[in-house]
Image (tube, helix red, strand yellow):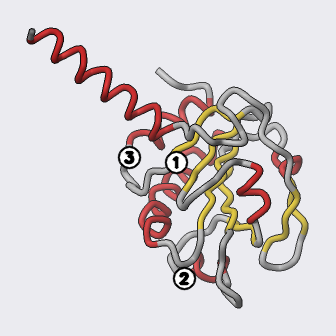
Amino acid sequence: MLSLRFTSAALVMALAFVFATFPASAGAPVGGKAPHFVLVDSSGELVSLKDFRGQPLVVHFWATWCPYCKKVQPGLQKLADKHADQGLVLIGISFREDEGSQPQSVLEARGHNFTTLVEGDEVAEMYGVRGTPTTVFIDAKGTVIGATHTSDPADPILERLAQQLLGTAE
């Protein structure tokens, strides 16, 4: 009886991990190619997924009004800083924003230096993003290797996915 309870508990925990890490509705399924996008940054410059070809990329879908995004962003910045010498790039894609919001200014006021692209509603839809925060990990070949909705800046899943992205997973 004890081993059945343990097995059931382990199964529930494993399923919870999978569903929390890999969104079932993702338009960019794990193992599939990341959908191509072209957006603008806060200065009006065009930025596309192709600009990051050959680089491991973390794409953080967020909004200025989202308290959970604000909470996880220091962890994402730390992750990007830690792995910058390995070529890891972090970008934000802001979506579902209020009129007149200034996402890049908000990030800078929070002490973050990663670029955010704006008006990303259609791209969020292409990636199957239903809520904030959603962070997608795309390898140098353009393959989605994972995604998470975590708002915990110290969540070990962030480092695990970064290591997998960089090919250094243990």
- Residue 159 position, x and y percent, is 47, 40
Dot 2 amino acid type: Ala
Q: Residue furthest left?
A: 2
The tag earlier along the polypeptide, 2 or 3, is 2
Do the numbered discs 2 and 3 sit on residues whose CB atoms are within 8 Å? no
**Mark 3 residue type:** Asp
Using the rendered view, name the quadrant where residue 122 is placed: bottom right
- Going 23% across and 23% down the picture, which residue do you hit? 9
Label 3: state its secondary structure: loop
Give the residue displayed 52% in from the left and 48% down from the top.
82
Q: Say few, some or many: other residues with alpha carbon within 10 Å of mark 1 (under 14 / 14 to 19 / 20 or more).
A: few
Q: Which residue is mark 1?
A: 82
For label 2, the residue is: 109
Q: Are marks 1 and 3 in contact (CB under 8 Å)?
A: no
Residue highlighted by disc 3: 155
Q: Which quarter of the figure has residue 86? A: top right
Q: Compared to 100, does 130 lie above or below?
A: above
**Callout 3 environment at 10 Å: few (<14), some (14 to 19), or many (20+)?**
few
Query: Which mark is in front, 1 or 3?
Result: 3
Name the residue type under label 1: Lys
Marks 1 and 3 sit apart, C-alpha to C-alpha, by 15 Å
Which of the marked residues, 1 or 3, is nearer the chain's N terminus?
1
Rendering coords of residue 117 (x, y %): 75, 67
Residue at image coords 59%, 65%: 62
- Kindly report which numbered mark, 2 or 1, lies closer to the viewer in this rendering: 2
Viewer-nearest residue: 61 or 109: 61
Q: Callout 2: few (<14), some (14-19), or many (20+) C-alpha neighbours within 10 Å?
A: few
Q: Residue 96 in the image: state x and y as whole percent.
A: 66, 72
